[in-house]
Image (tube, helix red, strand yellow):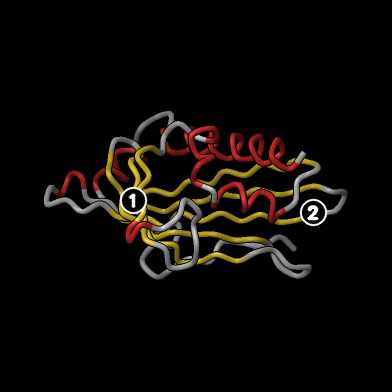
Amino acid sequence: MQHSIHWPNGLVPGEVDNFVSNEIVVAGLTPNAALDTLIDTRTWAAQYDNATDIEFHDGQPPHLTAGLRFQFVTFGLPVQAEITELERATDDSPARIAWHGWTESDDPNEQLDVHHAWLFEALPGDRLRLLTQETQNGAPARDMATTTPNPMLNKHQEWIEGLAQVAANRDS
């Protein structure tokens, strides 16, 4: 049985303005190695070119932790974020991380509310399933959802592939 993302009320796929899902399966990488790579924001530039200007509230270190508040720029929007879920993998469960993100703007065309989640699940045969899904509400979400090709879908594919590559290089 494959595991799934835990969705908060108001940001459930099918009930939002935009939803994307990206998944890959790779060999030779562990769930916690992938998680450790993602929570180290110093590696984000090597993974993904669409998350810049990462800053931490209260002078926190560059590693994401449960409850941490941070901000970054993505798709040209300054996003505030808070880690809402962070679990290391065990024999019975996958590694998980999720953040709630939002923009702080008085302009309704720039207001965005998101839930971005990642799941790293060990599969038989020394394989790893990497899944990232994001739900969004707001005008920018509606714009992305109706753009072909969907920019969020394509950029998240770059991120998930970049994450796997960086994690594999760190783990070797």
Q: Which mark is residue 6?
A: none
| Image quadrant occupied by the N terminus | bottom right
Relative image position of residue 91 (x, y in whole percent)? 78, 68
**What type is the residue that disc 1 sits on?**
Gln
**Circle 2 sits in a helix, a strand or a loop, which is it?**
strand
Mark nearer the N terminus (1 vs 2): 1
Relative image position of residue 4 (x, y in whole percent)? 61, 61
Going 70% across and 49% down the picture, which residue do you hit? 129
Q: Closer to the camera, 171 or 108?
A: 171
Q: Quadrant of residue 115?
A: bottom left
Q: Which mark is residue 123?
A: 2
Vertical comparison of 146 with 41: above or below: above
Left or right of residue 26: residue 7: left
Q: Which residue is mark 1?
A: 71
Q: How many marks?
A: 2
**Circle 1 sits in a helix, a strand or a loop, which is it?**
strand
